[in-house]
Amino acid sequence: PLLLRPGRGMILHETARGSPPVEMLQLYNYDANQFARLVREVLCELEVPYLCISAGKGSPQREVLKELSGATTVPFIVDPNTGTQMIDSEAIIAYLVK
């Protein structure tokens, strides 16, 4: 079942930074994945520019995801500015709002 979260991802978060990162973050996700959606909402609230990479079944990006993370689990984020790569929505959100 889909849970509605009105307003999420549409309002600027209080920890939003003033200047965007030099390089865009890369978020590997599936469109219908609820954990990836949580990360997308936080990225929007923080106004962090990111590249949303769909890595669903049948996608060529799925193999890229597997090479990077060792699995096909999403969400998976790559921050080329710091070299950080991580999986798990809670860890990613904590990283983003720090």
Image (cartoon, rainbow, N blue to C red):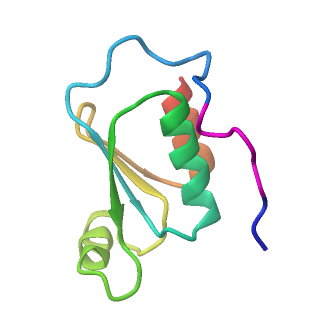
Left or right placement of residue 75 versus residue 12 in this view: left
Residue located at (31% from left, 77% from top): 62
Q: Is residue 9 magenta?
A: yes
Q: Kindly report the secondary structure that dominates the magenta region of the rendered protein.
A: loop
- Magenta residue span: 4-10
Residue 20 location, x and y as percent?
Answer: 31, 22
Q: Which residue extends farthest top? A: 18
Which of 2 and 60 lies nearest the eye of the viewer? Answer: 2
Which of 75 and 40 lies nearest the eye of the viewer? Answer: 40
Residue located at (36% from left, 72% from top): 55
Looking at the picture, does residue 74 appear above or below residue 51? below
Residue located at (23% from left, 80% from top): 60
Q: Is residue 42 magenta?
A: no
Examine the image and state in which quarter residue 52 appears.
bottom left
Q: How many marks?
A: 0
Looking at the picture, does residue 35 appear above or below residue 61? above
Left or right placement of residue 19 versus residue 64 in this view: right
Q: Quadrant of the N terminus?
A: bottom right
Residue 21 location, x and y as percent?
Answer: 28, 25
Residue located at (28% from left, 64% from top): 68
Examine the image and state in which quarter residue 35 appears.
bottom right
Residue 65 location, x and y as percent?
Answer: 31, 69
Residue 72 location, x and y as percent?
Answer: 42, 75
